[in-house]
Amino acid sequence: MEIIKESYLKDYARCPYSLHLKLKGINQPMLGTIAISMYFSIQKRKLLEIKDHNIGLIFPRQIHAGESLKTASEMSPEELSQHLAFKTAESFGNHLKGFWLINNQKYANQETLWLFESQPFQTANTIKQAGTNYFNFLSTHGAPALGFIDKEIVFEHKSQKYLVRIPSIYKRIGIIDTSLWNFNQDIDSEISSGLDKSALVTLRLLGLSTLLQQQFFRLKFDLTDSFESLRYQHFNCSRGILSETTRTQQDTDSMQKAIDTFINKFERNEFPPNPKHCSSCPYNSLDDLFEPVCRKRNPNERYPIPKEFFKKRNWRIEKEEEIVRAFIQNHEIAKLEGNQFQTLFPQLDLEKRMRKLIACASSTNP
Ligand code: SF4
């Protein structure tokens, strides 16, 4: 392969069939939990749009503030906390929650899908806590290097090119990864994902050490290119927990084994499903025609559905009735024809009937 993207490795480790669907160009429906992670990632960057709170922003895209006109990366943690885009941790947390409560039905022009009715509300509380903790994290640890947040870098290792995403680089530390939840990403399906074992961490640190072979970056980040001296920290924003790990050359050997296995299977076109991960997979959902996006899904997993299906609706009723009817007939959930549909749950009104039918559909083998 000319270049291996870390996203391919991550997808393959979770479920090879999901990578097959992605490479076929099958659109991934938007899970609410993925949407909120993306939203949080963007908002974290907005918090770093520093300003002087007494006078506000002097000009658009302002990157300097304070008497000495420093950038966020140059400020001490105390100075930074005075100049972040929000004045207090609580105001940032409340802003995140408020926006998400109003806008959780759609993200990036896609309808978001949920597993249970109170899930959007629960995630709003999670993001409030995460916003508060992230503000406090910046006030204690300072800002990452600007221009190196979620930075994609390409590097070569043993004659193979890789593309990795570095969450953020901190001077004298290495990589700091701040996310909504626990760290559970890996590129090796053989071991359980966790910060101390993840081969993804090894690959990203390898990418950073390659970048540091250039003197400019060594000076900029005050780091050496010695792979074993670099640290990878993860901050679980919703719980406010900071963890740290490092890697040795031995770890690159086990990472290499996982990558060789991936290349081997990829080239042999082996993309078996791994139903262990269906519960959190975007392909475990229904398309616009109520057909399952992934035909190899674990049939016992519920489908996530749009929030409106849990609630009273007054839109697209006719269209949805048509879709639900087609879905029920296609999948023989009930042998219904014509107006039998109307009598399936006669005690319920149309909307409730549809919700009930969708609930049936969600727990039935397609
Ligand atoms: S729904 Fe399950 S089997 Fe299908 S791609 Fe996702 S994880 Fe794999």
Image (cartoon, rainbow, N blue to C red):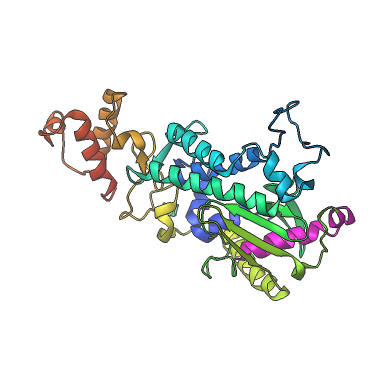
Q: Residue at x 53, y 51 (%)?
A: 180
Return the x and y of residue 146 as percentages of the image width and height. Answer: 75, 44
Can I make out residue 122 in this image?
yes
Q: Is residue 102 above or below residue 131?
A: above
218 over 148 or under it: above or below:
below
Kindly give the residue lying farthest to the front in the view shown: 54
Residue 70: x percent and y percent? Answer: 81, 41
- Give the extent of the magenta segment: 198-219
Q: If the image is split into quadrants, where does the N terminus sit?
A: bottom right
Q: Is residue 318 left or right of residue 135?
A: left
x 16%, y 33%: residue: 341
- In the image, residue 256 lies at what x, y percent? 67, 68
Assign the magenta stretch its main secondary structure: helix
Depth check, front residue: 273 or 54: 54
Residue 220 lies left or right of residue 25; in this view the side is right
**Residue 208 magenta-drawn?**
yes
Look at the picture and state if 235 lies above or below 315.
below
Q: Residue 107, image x and y in percent?
A: 49, 34
Q: Quadrant of residue 40?
A: top right
Any part of residue 160 in sight:
no
Given residues 133 and 14, the one toward you in this image is: 133
Decide which of 311, 209 is in the foreground and name it. 311
Residue found farthest to the bottom? 250
**How many numbered marks have been drawn onto this rendered protein structure?**
0
Can residue 244 be found in the magenta stretch?
A: no
Identity of the residue drawn at 13% across and 36% down: 344
Closer to us: 330 or 13:
13
